[in-house]
Image (cartoon, grey):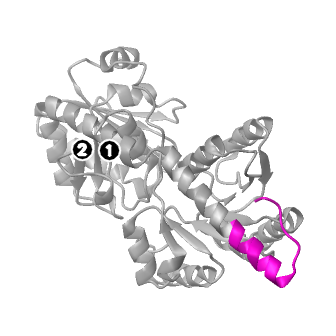
Amino acid sequence: IAVEPLVGGALHHVQCLLDHTDAEEFDLHLAASAERDPSVRQRFRAWRKAGRRVHEVPMVRRIAPHRDAVAFERLLALCRGERFDVVHTHCAKAGFLGRLAGRLTGAATVHTPHVLPFGRGGGVAAEAVYLGLERLAGRWTDRLVLLSRYQQNLVLCHRLVPYERTVVIPNGIEPGAPGRLTKAQARRQLGLARNERVVLAAGRLCEQKGYDVLLDAVGHALGGGASLRVLIAGDGPLREELSERVRRQGLGQAVRLLGRVADLGPLYAACDLVAMPSRFEGMPYTMLQAQAAARPVAVSLVSGMEEFVGHGRDGFLLAPAAVEAWARLLVELAGMRGLLREMGRRARSRLKTRWPASRCVGELHGLYRLLAEAKREERSREGLPGHSDE
């Protein structure tokens, strides 16, 4: 498995694979970069201590010819040395370099983009470059794993790979038992009033997540007489900017910027609604975690999110960057206590039925077995030596 960056959804996905992969059947190696978030090295140490084989390969997000060449040589040497049956790459940079390394060493190649690196307003020139690179890498791809039908349709419209080399495998998490804290207990722990409406936003503080839209909506809602508390958990490049925005707009009494939070459980337990005003998405783990905690989500209607959230049934779908629509929802929360509770129950039920981690990982394991066996048969016909189990 090759990953860059090992943050956000990609990190959750890799952790899920490591937690649910039998080391007796799959000899799994992880090649990942800590350049974006050096704190991930703590996970590297924990995974190694647990017996997983982790290789740190520095990679950067931007196109950087010299650094990319060094990273590619590291990945190529790893693939040659270990003779993998399957190389599964994640995200754009590791996806391009890792698929080429896998193809050159005779491995089957699988790629999960998580969020497609085009179609998100990056400018005409940048879009053309990334689209060209993805079409090139598509030639080295045995299976492209997409998170939704929306992503699959986008890939086919842009002719990255033929239909038969695509597969839709949504993310998943185990819903587990209900949280250890009641809403009242969680609110006491966090110093929140029992009867106020509490909205949680959790994720990386970056432009993609649309926190500027949320803060503008909070300002409008407070001006309209709403009584609410908004908790924003996460860190990222926009932290200082968002903090200044809260101060400038006079939102300090209503909005808390919590920074990075190790355990989000009490926050999910305390909130009434999870807000995700993103500009684009894949299949966010924040949504899955909210559903596991029986909390409805309000999400921007982008990137096929209607496949995961039923508007008015287990959550809300709002037009992207629609500040007035978000503000209206925040105002109306005051009269939704019973509805929000019922939506949360439906959301948890939907997660348990459709997106458990065991289903996601089981489908990936089935794909690995299928491709590994096909590669072994191909090598046998050509008289080539076999590779490792994976």
Q: Residue at x 38, y 41 (%)?
A: 352
Q: Is residue 355 left or right of residue 315?
A: right
User: Between tags 1 and 2, which lies in front?
Assistant: 1
Can you see residue 308? Answer: yes
Q: In the displayed structure, does residue 299 sit left or right of residue 258?
A: left
Closest to the observer, 92 or 382: 382
Q: Are marks 1 and 2 in contact (CB under 8 Å)?
A: yes
Q: Please tell me in which quadrant of the rendered image residue 207 appears.
A: bottom left
Q: Up-down: is 263 above or below 236?
A: above
On the image, the x and y values in percent for residue 188 come to 35, 14
Q: Earlier in the sequence, mark 1 or mark 2?
A: 2
Mark 2, residue position? 314
Say few, some or many: other residues with alpha carbon within 10 Å of mark 2 (under 14 / 14 to 19 / 20 or more).
many
Q: Does 45 lie within the magenta span?
A: no
Q: Is residue 52 left or right of residue 350?
A: right
The magenta region covers 372-390
Q: Can see residue 104?
A: no
Asked which quadrant contains residue 292, the reply is: top left
Q: Whole-percent x and y of residue 157?
A: 40, 83
Q: Is residue 376 magenta?
A: yes
Residue type of the residue flagged with mark 1: Arg
Residue located 52% across and 82% down the image:
160
Q: Secondary structure at mark 1?
A: helix
Which disc is residue 67 wearing? none
- Could you tell me residue 200's position as x and y percent? 34, 36
Amino acid on which the number 2 mark rests in the picture: Asp
Q: Which mark is residue 350?
A: 1
Q: Secondary structure at mark 2?
A: loop
